Image (spheres, helix red, strand yellow):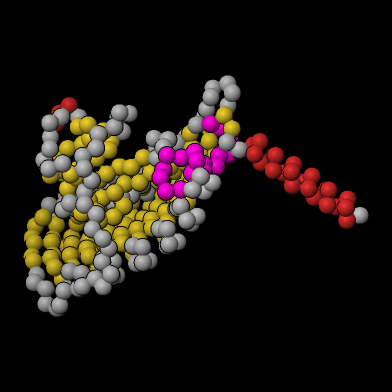
């Protein structure tokens, strides 16, 4: 009886293994496009840092376009993101994670725009940005920015993406830095600066500085010879690569768009004064 159970178990495992391998990573023979459930491993991906058998991402393709829930993973196996797609575009709720397991970003996409509540966090779990977007993809109501130590950096209110009322900036140690009052339409009516009164905050474990990346791609014809000041660059497929202010041969203030091996936007890196300040929001650039 035990021998019979052993052979039955082996047959079941072999059959299940065959069925799984036979139903994933399929190509439609009629059009050569990806279809069904796919598991992308390191040996199949252009993304560096993964072992050959490590899982990079998994989800469903329809005509080589991502559909439904897709999961991405860090090289250490931790979940990197959970994003819902429709015909290759992110839609609905999504969450991204740091490789330590902490939530990095949470939001909702609709027609390529952020809508509803948006949350962005530091790797230590502290909130970085809290805001709400309306159906037009513009901020509506209170907008808050925080330093990595948890102190408020900026607090203001918007109506359809435009500042209204009073905005307040703070130093990293919590002292008030600036107050700006806006008239209707986001026009500055008054601005007052403040001196820091307490000791400056000193980060006990500062992150290594990442300089702005060197110019990548080609500038559009309107500014093909641009080196300094504002401009945009594009890759060979007309996807935007960089958008911002350049100094010398590097991005100084602006955004660097990073795409995956399938040409889909993976994430955005933001730079300020020539230094990396964090990842940008998935999807279109928010209006505020």
x then y, percent, for residue 124: 36, 66
Q: Position of residue 246 (x, y in %)?
A: 15, 43
In front: 49, or 84? 49
Residue at image point 32% right, 28% down: 237
Residue 192 can be seen in this image = yes
**Residue drawn at x 74%, y 47% as measured from the top left:** 13
Q: 154 or 237: nearer the eye?
A: 237
Residue in the foreground of this view, choosing between 101 and 11: 11
User: Residue 210 appears in which quarter of the rendering?
Assistant: bottom left
Q: Is residue 45 magenta?
A: yes
Q: Is residue 129 above or below residue 33?
A: below
Q: Quadrant of residue 249?
A: top left
Residue 97 left/right relative to 147? right
Q: Name above or below for residue 48 compared with residue 35.
A: below
Which residue is most to the bottom? 198
Magenta segment boundaries in residue numbering: 34-50
């Amino acid at each position: 009886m035990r021998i019979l159970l052993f052979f039955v178990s082996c047959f079941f495992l072999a059959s299940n293994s065959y069925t799984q391998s036979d139903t994933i990573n399929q190509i439609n023979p009629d059009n050569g496009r990806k279809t069904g459930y796919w598991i992308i491993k390191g040996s199949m991906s252009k993304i560096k840092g993964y072992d050959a058998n490590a899982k990079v991402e998994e989800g469903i393709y329809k005509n080589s376009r991502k559909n439904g829930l897709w999961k991405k993973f860090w090289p250490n196996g931790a979940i990197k993101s959970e994003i819902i797609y429709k015909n290759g575009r992110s839609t609905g709720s999504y969450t991204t994670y740091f490789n330590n397991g902490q939530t990095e970003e949470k939001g909702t996409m609709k027609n390529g725009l952020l809508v509803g509540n948006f949350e962005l966090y530091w790797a230590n779990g502290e909130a970085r940005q809290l805001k709400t977007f309306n159906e037009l993809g513009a901020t509506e109501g209170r907008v808050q920015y925080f330093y990595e130590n948890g102190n408020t950096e900026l607090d203001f209110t918007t109506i359809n993406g435009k500042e209204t009322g009073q905005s307040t900036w703070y130093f990293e140690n919590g002292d008030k830095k600036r107050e700006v009052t806006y008239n209707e339409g986001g026009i500055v009516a008054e601005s007052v600066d403040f001196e820091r009164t307490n000791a400056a905050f000193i980060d006990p474990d500062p992150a290594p500085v990442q300089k702005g990346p060197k110019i990548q791609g080609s500038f559009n014809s309107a500014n093909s010879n641009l080196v300094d000041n504002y401009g945009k660059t594009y890759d060979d497929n007309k996807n935007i690569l960089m958008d911002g202010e350049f100094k010398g041969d590097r991005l100084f203030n602006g955004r660097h768009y990073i795409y995956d091996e399938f040409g889909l936007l993976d994430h955005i890196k933001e730079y300020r004064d020539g230094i990396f300040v964090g990842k940008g929001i998935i999807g279109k650039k928010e209006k505020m």
